[in-house]
């Protein structure tokens, strides 16, 4: 067995063992936030999106992949009424144009549900809301492992409310300036607002600073599932728009991303790439001796013609050489001017000469003189050296 074959076999066995070890390991938990409707990791919103048809019974659940401004431009005024528009993400940044589109949408009688740790200053200031950090309060200088909260109308009850784990998803902000048209819905143990309801025109905006409470990880807990259900019952049972545009870290579906997301396909992909690399390294070497470069064969037809002509000339057979010169000239006329001299000369000599003059642009007297001399040589038994030279001069003059 060749050394290269042994090396490839050994490497193949090593990679096969590595593949088996890696394949039998448990997939690590992905704790990065996603908030997408198809995300099944702990901080995705797959369970919530699947629950929406139960909360809003017999209503259409529509996914929106456009920005707010583009979505408003795509639908007519009649189509943009009676809608619950849901936004859930770690951060929600709305520019002035989007903020104005949101306010017009809500004034028209629609409901907006927003859950994010932070909101853009433009949007918050427009609603006269102030976001403050929970750590700013001196009474809250440390964080417990669990963050407790509850609905405001249930503080006096005996239950302990709801909780999220600060280790994975900290609640960092709360709303200040909750007065006038604003209503506090959810608060923490220090009575700081975590969810508020704002009436604008014929509609309402519900804002929450705990987006992680709506993810798969917490919805698997019965108590938190109750919190989510009650949060959405603040909106009427009507058509739902689910936002998929304002999502941080949302994965796009591509063939390569799908392959890398599956353990078996991922390792098959890696092994294929490694195998291709090994093939290039070991099998791409030259296996045949270098073929020496040979000079191409030279075209010696000109030298051959000169040699044959020299033989005829030295032999003194001027007539034979002249006939071959004439034959070559007739072939030149056929290839250059697309005429048939042998046939046309026999049929009508005058017509052929006139035709050739038109095609070549030569004077008729010069052409007649040339073909008269050719006729003389063809009928002669022998010619002198001077006559052979004269024939060559007339032919070369015609060609030029």
Image: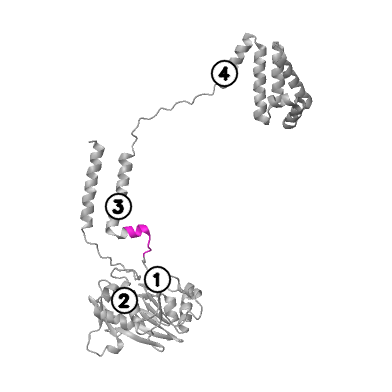
First-in-chain label (1 vs 2): 2
Residue density around tag 3, few if under 14, some if 14–19, many if 20 or more, within 10 Å: some
The answer to whether marks 1 and 2 mark residues whose Cβ atoms lie closer than 8 Å is: no
Q: Is residue 376 magenta?
A: no
First-in-chain label (3 vs 2): 2
**Circle 3 sits on which residue?**
270
Which of the two discs, 1 and 4, sits closer to the camera? 4
Residue 196 image point, x, y percent: 36, 84
- Give the CA distance from mark 3 to mark 2: 36 Å
Q: Which mark is residue 244?
A: 1
The answer to whether marks 1 and 4 mark residues whose Cβ atoms lie closer than 8 Å is: no
First-in-chain label (4 vs 2): 2
**Circle 2 sits on which residue?**
214
Residue 80 image point, x, y percent: 47, 79
239 lies left or right of 141? right
368 lies left or right of 27? right
Q: Which residues are magenta?
A: 251-259
């Amino acid at each position: 067995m060749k050394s290269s074959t042994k090396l490839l076999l050994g490497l193949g066995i090593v990679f096969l063992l590595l593949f088996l070890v890696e394949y039998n390991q448990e997939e690590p938990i992905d704790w990065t936030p996603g908030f997408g409707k198809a995300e099944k990791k702990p901080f995705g919103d797959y369970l919530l999106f699947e629950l929406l048809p139960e909360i809003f019974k017999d209503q259409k659940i529509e996914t929106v992949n456009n920005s707010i401004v583009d979505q408003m431009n795509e639908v007519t005024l009649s189509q943009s009424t009676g809608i619950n528009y849901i936004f859930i993400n770690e951060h929600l940044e709305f520019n002035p144009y989007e903020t104005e589109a949101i306010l017009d949408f809500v004034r028209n009688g629609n409901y907006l549900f927003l859950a994010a740790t932070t909101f853009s200053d433009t949007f918050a200031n427009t609603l006269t809301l102030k976001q403050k950090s929970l750590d700013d309060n001196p009474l809250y200088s440390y964080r417990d492992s669990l963050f407790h909260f509850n609905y405001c109308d249930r503080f006096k009850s005996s239950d302990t409310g709801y909780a999220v784990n600060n280790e994975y998803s900290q609640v960092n902000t709360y709303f200040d300036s909750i007065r006038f048209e604003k209503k506090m819905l959810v608060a923490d143990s220090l009575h700081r607002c975590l969810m508020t309801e704002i009436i604008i025109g014929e509609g309402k905006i519900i804002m929450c600073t705990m987006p992680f409470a709506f993810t798969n990880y917490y919805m698997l807990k019965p108590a938190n599932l109750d919190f989510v259900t009650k949060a959405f019952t603040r909106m009427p049972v009507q058509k739902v728009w689910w936002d998929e545009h304002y999502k941080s870290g949302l994965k796009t579906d591509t063939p390569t991303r799908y392959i890398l997301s599956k353990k078996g396909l991922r390792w098959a992909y890696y092994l294929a790439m490694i195998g291709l690399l090994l093939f290039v390294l070991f099998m791409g070497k030259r296996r045949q001796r270098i073929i020496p470069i040979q000079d191409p064969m030279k075209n010696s037809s000109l030298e051959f013609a000169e040699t044959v002509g020299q033989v005829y000339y030295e032999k003194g057979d001027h007539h034979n050489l002249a006939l071959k010169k004439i034959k070559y000239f007739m072939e030149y006329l056929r290839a250059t001017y697309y005429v048939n001299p042998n046939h046309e000369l026999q049929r009508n000599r005058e017509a052929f000469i006139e035709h050739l003059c038109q095609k070549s642009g030569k004077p008729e007297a010069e052409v007649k003189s040339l073909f008269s001399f050719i006729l003389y040589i063809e009928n002669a038994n022998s010619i002198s050296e001077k006559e052979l030279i004269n024939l060559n001069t007339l032919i070369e003059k015609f060609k030029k």
